[in-house]
C-alpha cells in the first residue's frame, strides 16, 4: 500500500513498517492515554442543526478533556494508515448521521488490524444481535477470529490500543 511516497507493510499482526522503520503498538497500552494522544476526527456530511451541534460538541469535549493535538485530514484511508503507522493515536467518525463508506475502510482496516490497532464501531450500531464491540461499562470486547470491524457500520473509532479507544469513545459520546 503506497501513501505519499511511503510504503506501509504489516508484519506478524503487531508491527507496521514505513520505509523500513517499524512501529509497534505493544507497549502503548500502559503509556498512551487521550491526554497525550494526537486525535483525528472527520466531520462527515451532516448539515442539520442537531448534526452540526453533535459534531462540534464532540470536538469541544475532547478539547476540554485534553489531548496532545487535534487534527482532521479529510481522508479516511489516510487517517487509518496514520494510526497504524503511529502518526496519529486515535481517529473517529460518524458522530452525526453516517461516517464513511465501506471503500473508505477496506484496505486501511487490514493495515490497522495487522499493526495491532483496535478498530470498532463508535456507536455500536451492529447489524447482528450479539455482535457488540463494547460491554456495558464501555470496555472494548475482545475480537475473536470470527469477528472483524463491520465496514457497513455508520460510525468508527480506531486507536493504537484499547485504552485510548475506550477513553476517547467515552469523551466523544459523553458517556
Image (cartoon, rainbow, N blue to C red):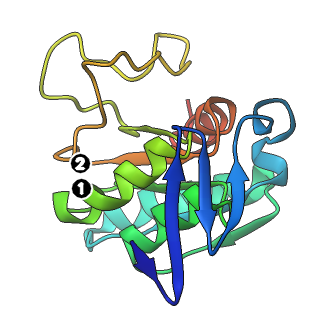
Residue 95 shows in the view = no
Viewer-proximal residue, 158 or 15? 15
Residue on which disc 1 sits:
97
Above or below residue 44? Residue 134 is: above
Residue at disc 1, secondary structure: loop
Q: Earlier in the sequence, mark 1 or mark 2?
A: 1
Q: Where is residue 156 in the image (x, y as percent from the top left)?
A: 38, 47
Question: In the figure, residue 76 lies in which quadrant?
Answer: bottom left
Rendered residue at 18%/57% (across/down)? 102
Question: Label 1: how many residues lie within 10 Å, few (<14), some (14-19) or many (20+)?
Answer: some
Question: Label 2: how many residues lie within 10 Å, few (<14), some (14-19) or many (20+)?
Answer: many
Residue at disc 2, secondary structure: loop
Q: Position of residue 139 (x, y in %)?
A: 56, 18
Question: In the figure, residue 175 lies in which quadrant?
Answer: top right
Residue 154 is labelled as 2
- 34 left or right, relative to 20: right
Check contact, mark 1 vs mark 2: CB within 8 A: yes
Residue 56 shows in the view = yes
Residue mark closest to the camera, 1 vs 2: 2
Q: Where is residue 9 in the image (x, y as percent from the top left)?
A: 50, 61
The quadrant of the rendering that contains the N terminus is: bottom left
Rendered residue at 67%/39% (across/down)? 164
The residue sitting at the bottom extreme is: 5
Amino acid at each position: 500500500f503506497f501513501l505519499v511516497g511511503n510504503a506501509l507493510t504489516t508484519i506478524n499482526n503487531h508491527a507496521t513498517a514505513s520505509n523500513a522503520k517499524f512501529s509497534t503498538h505493544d507497549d502503548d497500552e500502559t503509556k498512551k492515554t487521550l491526554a497525550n494522544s494526537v486525535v483525528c476526527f472527520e466531520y462527515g456530511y451532516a448539515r442539520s442543526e442537531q448534526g452540526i451541534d453533535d459534531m462540534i460538541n464532540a470536538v469541544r469535549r475532547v478539547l476540554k478533556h485534553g489531548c496532545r493535538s487535534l487534527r482532521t485530514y479529510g481522508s479516511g484511508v489516510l487517517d487509518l494508515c496514520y494510526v497504524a503507522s503511529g502518526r496519529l493515536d486515535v481517529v473517529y467518525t460518524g458522530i452525526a448521521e453516517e461516517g464513511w463508506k465501506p471503500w473508505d475502510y477496506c484496505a486501511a482496516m487490514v493495515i490497522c488490524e495487522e499493526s495491532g490497532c483496535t478498530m470498532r464501531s463508535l456507536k455500536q450500531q451492529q447489524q447482528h444481535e450479539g455482535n457488540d464491540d463494547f460491554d456495558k461499562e464501555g470496555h472494548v470486547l475482545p475480537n475473536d477470529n470470527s469477528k472483524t470491524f463491520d465496514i457497513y457500520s455508520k460510525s468508527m473509532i480506531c486507536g493504537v490500543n484499547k485504552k485510548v479507544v475506550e477513553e476517547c469513545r467515552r469523551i466523544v459520546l459523553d458517556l
